[in-house]
Image (tube, grey):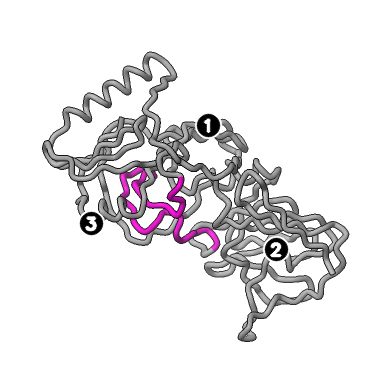
């Protein structure tokens, strides 16, 4: 039997299953569920004789679970593929959010002051987001209809693979462009970058029509809308488990867009208001993070608050952020 060890990192809820390099050969069969139907393949049950990071459970692995693309994303080397990771402990906001203000420069301070004045002078039905105060208000003329505590961007920079991501919630005026119920999250490149950097993994993008041959002889490929494997000596395509990252040969593989392996349900809560350019007002399954600076650019709300916004804020509403 293989020596399978579950290691829970103290700094996160990320579970890494490590298959020992002294593992003996497995029988090569995929698991069967209780009904006798062949189960999905996992990295753990496809390999033998190597030392592997085999199962990064994506649904419980993120420092911030948010879809914001973050403004000012630039490329240091256009030939590089972005990848970097910083998984940390779950942030718990147990006290009222701090309103202390910190600026990078005089120019930054003046920009904030201008955005604040613009928000205070705004009229009509609008949303006002105070980044320092971690609050969102829905205002109709002079009446405040709803006040909510929010989570905002962590204001950090991520560098990996020749790319730079600046995780900020930009000041200014945006517009609610559309609203969605039960949205799904398509992780952008920075998500894979964070995980790869934290765990010392390489990153490789899977491409449709291209077969990757692993060291074990297993073939990794995309068929239809799923990523899967073909074991040595077999012609059967076995889809990979959908709740795992795809990690073989110390490499984190990025699934192609529009595959089941690239989308995650539940990460944005039950409702989403899209402000364009990847910036969202959305819910979260991590309610204890509300009131902290932890997102990658979006404004995150508790379930009851984002549901109220979904039901009461019409498309076209202006959002003032300062």
Q: Residue at x 39, y 24 (%)?
A: 100
In the displayed structure image, the side of residue 216 where residue 90 appears, left or right: left
In the displayed structure image, the side of residue 76 where residue 101 appears, left or right: left
Q: What stretch is highlighted in magenta?
A: 261-288
Local SS, label 3: helix
Q: Where is residue 39 in the image (x, y as percent from the top left)?
A: 64, 76
Q: Mark 3 points at which residue?
A: 311
Q: Residue at x 39, y 42 (%)?
A: 298
Residue 278 located within the stretch drawn in magenta: yes
Tell me the CA gap for discs 3 and 1.
35 Å
Position of the C terminus, as image quadrant, is top left
Q: Where is residue 62 in the image (x, y as percent from the top left)?
A: 55, 48
Q: Where is residue 2 in the image (x, y as percent from the top left)?
A: 83, 66
In the displayed structure image, the side of residue 107 where residue 175 appears, left or right: left
Q: Quadrant of residue 102?
A: top left
Q: Name the residue under label 1.
A: 157
Q: Residue at x 59, y 42 (%)?
A: 88
Front tag of 3 and 2 = 3
Q: Name the residue under label 2.
A: 43
Q: Nearer the viewer, residue 91 or 306?
A: 91
* Label 1: how many Cα within 10 Å (few below 14, some 14–19, many 20+): few
């Amino acid at each position: 039997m293989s020596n399978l060890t579950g290691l829970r990192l103290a700094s996160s809820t990320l579970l890494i299953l490590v298959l020992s390099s002294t593992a003996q050969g497995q029988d090569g069969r995929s698991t069967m569920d209780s009904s006798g139907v062949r189960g999905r393949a996992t990295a753990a049950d496809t390999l033998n004789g190597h030392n592997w990071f085999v199962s990064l459970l994506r649904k419980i692995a993120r420092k911030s679970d948010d879809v914001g693309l973050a403004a000012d994303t630039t490329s240091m080397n256009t030939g590089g593929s972005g990848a970097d990771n910083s998984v940390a402990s779950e942030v718990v906001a147990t006290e009222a959010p701090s309103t202390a203000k910190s600026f990078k420069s005089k120019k930054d301070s003046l920009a904030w002051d201008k955005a604040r004045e613009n928000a205070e002078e705004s009229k009509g039905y609008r949303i006002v987001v105070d980044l320092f105060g971690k609050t969102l208000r829905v205002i109709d003329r002079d009446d405040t209809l709803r006040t909510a505590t929010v989570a905002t961007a962590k204001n950090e920079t991520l560098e990996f693979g020749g790319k730079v991501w600046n995780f900020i919630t930009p000041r200014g005026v945006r517009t609610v462009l559309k609203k969605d119920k039960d949205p799904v999250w398509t992780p952008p490149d920075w998500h894979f970058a964070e995980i790869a950097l934290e765990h010392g993994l390489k990153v490789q993008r899977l491409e449709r029509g291209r077969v990757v041959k692993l060291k074990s002889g297993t073939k990794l490929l995309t068929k239809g809308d799923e990523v899967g494997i073909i074991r040595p000596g077999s012609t059967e395509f076995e889809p990979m488990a959908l709740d795992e990252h795809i990690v073989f040969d110390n490499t984190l593989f990025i699934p192609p867009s529009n595959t089941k392996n690239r989308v995650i349900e539940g990460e944005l809560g039950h409702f989403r208001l899209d402000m364009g350019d990847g910036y969202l007002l959305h819910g979260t399954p991590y309610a204890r993070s509300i009131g902290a600076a932890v997102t990658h650019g979006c404004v995150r709300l508790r379930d009851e608050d984002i549901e109220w916004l979904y039901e009461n804020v019409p498309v076209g509403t202006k959002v003032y952020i300062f």
